[in-house]
Image: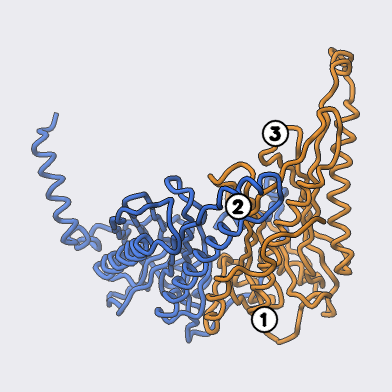
Chain colours: A orange, B blue
Amino acid sequence: MSENPGPEGLPEDAGHRLAELRNLFTSDLSVNEFLLIKEAGFHPLGFVMGSSIYHTGIQARKWSKSQELTKLTGAMYNARELAMTRMEEEAQQLDADGVVGVRLDVNYYEWGNDSAEFIAMGTAVRAENGVSHRNKLGMPFTSDLSGQDFWTLMQTGYIPAGLVMGTCVYHIAHRGLAQTISSVGQNVELPNFTQALYEARELAMTRMQDEGGRLDAAGIVGVRLEEKSHQWGSHTIEFLALGTAVVRSDGELTLPKPTTIISLDH
Amino acid sequence: MDDPGARRREIRDGVRKLAAGGYLEGAERQGVTSDLTIDESLILHSIGWEPVELVCGASTYAVPPTLWNWGSGEITSASQAYQWAVRDAGQKLRAECLGVLGHGVVGVHFDVEFERHFVNAVLVGTAVSPVGDHHAPGVPFVSDLSGRDFALLHQAGWDPVGLAAGASFVYAPRRSARDAVRQTAQNVELTNYTEALYSARESAMERMQQTASQLGAHGVVGVSVSEGPMEFAAHAVRFAAWGTAVRRSERQPVLAPPVMVLDLDDERLAFDPTSLRAAR
């Protein structure tokens, strides 16, 4: 996407604690999720994390032009990619089959408006029967599905291949004076806004689908489309599409018929 | 209008009694105090346990004066104060639990306040014991799991053994003025912060794991983390991690396989999976 400065791999201190994780596991799963993951035939190995504190560059925007801000898009991609890769490396160090319950966050601290922490966390798991569930690239799968969703997905004969995302930072043009005046008092669509938002979403979704294609995914489930202005003012918006790419597993399909219930606790 | 002097004496006597553990003596006669919900009590009873008493442990440590914004490496005095405060609060909680013949404490609120000059750890939870068992065990367990989660784990053949926590405070060195100016318009990773956070995270998680290993645990579930710089120190990062250490028990697990259900309640048809994660 763009230049990739800074250290490639894990910072120096990473990995100490993982070396100690032999007879002990750590996990941020709730008890429900923990038991469901065990039920699905996986064992949690460790709480894995990757993070990067990233300084975003500056890009000039034209007041009256809708355009993608490629430098900012690049920064958002690059920083998330760093965090995700570091998390995957930690998972690989634990010899994991995958990471479930991944959360991707952006935190702003008191360090200034242009820098933010990008962090990815999740629980590394391994199949208890020794069958490898790694994805097509030979890496542990990642997934932002909760333990409940993971169990349900396994029941339907699919397994996660990877967390896929697409992002696009877009500057939406301001309306000109003549345009503003001509629409006062009228019911009209604002085509420039509509079009800009459409295009930005399309870009983000397409990029996410491309990532899914690279993993030979059968589909992407649990897609979320987030729109955030971060700290760029109201006309610059990041569109982030995020979902879990899934592939068919060889296992036999044992989809139980759901029982309908009406709960009495109101 | 009460006599203010009498009121003050009453409070003082109460505090003295509290310090001596006296208020807990008559607990059995007075009935049970607990912050468990009705559901949780019922579920506890279903596995043969019952709430005994609300217990608490608190500890405050002073943090020696430190230059919070200038330095390098770990701020050991702060990390130590945190560890000790949590450890002592846990010990007091255990002592109170033993005082009421509880076998463990569930639903512990893990509340640690960290300020520039002190760290304050408060643990409040409900002591529980098997129904009718009035013999105190050797070491009671402490767990921040809800009564419901405790029952689920118990049935699945796991026992909580204690609260595992670890924290670390690390300085994030400043960038040189030349770098700061040069990087203004660039997309670049701030390696000084990234490395400081990593260093803090590794030490904190390692300490949590060591605590769990010492307790003889096989794993830690429900780990929560709190990280980032502090309000009074933008150039130092804090990382704290805590969770419940669990151990496989010899009991035969009796977990019923999950059944897929479709909820027909109107309000809940809009199913939000993230709410399950949030409602720990």
Q: Residues within 10 Å of mark 2 (few under 14, many from 20)?
A: few
Q: Quadrant of the N terminus of chain B?
A: top left
Q: Nearer the viewer, residue B67 or B254?
A: B67
The residue under label 2 is A264
Q: Is residue B217 left or right of residue B127?
A: right
Earlier along the polypeptide chain: callout 3 or callout 2? 3
Q: Are marks 1 and 2 in contact (CB under 8 Å)?
A: no
* Count of numbered tags: 3
Earlier along the polypeptide chain: callout 1 or callout 2? 1
Mark 3, mark 2: which one is toward the viewer?
3
Q: Which residue shows up at 79% across the image and 54% down it? A: A223
Residue B205: x percent and y percent? 49, 69
The residue under label 3 is A233
Tell me: residue A229, above or below residue B204: above
**Residue B217 makes an appearance in the image:** yes
Mark 3, mark 1: which one is toward the viewer?
3
**Tag shown at residue A81:** none
Q: Quadrant of the C terminus of chain B?
A: bottom right
Q: Secondary structure at mark 3?
A: loop
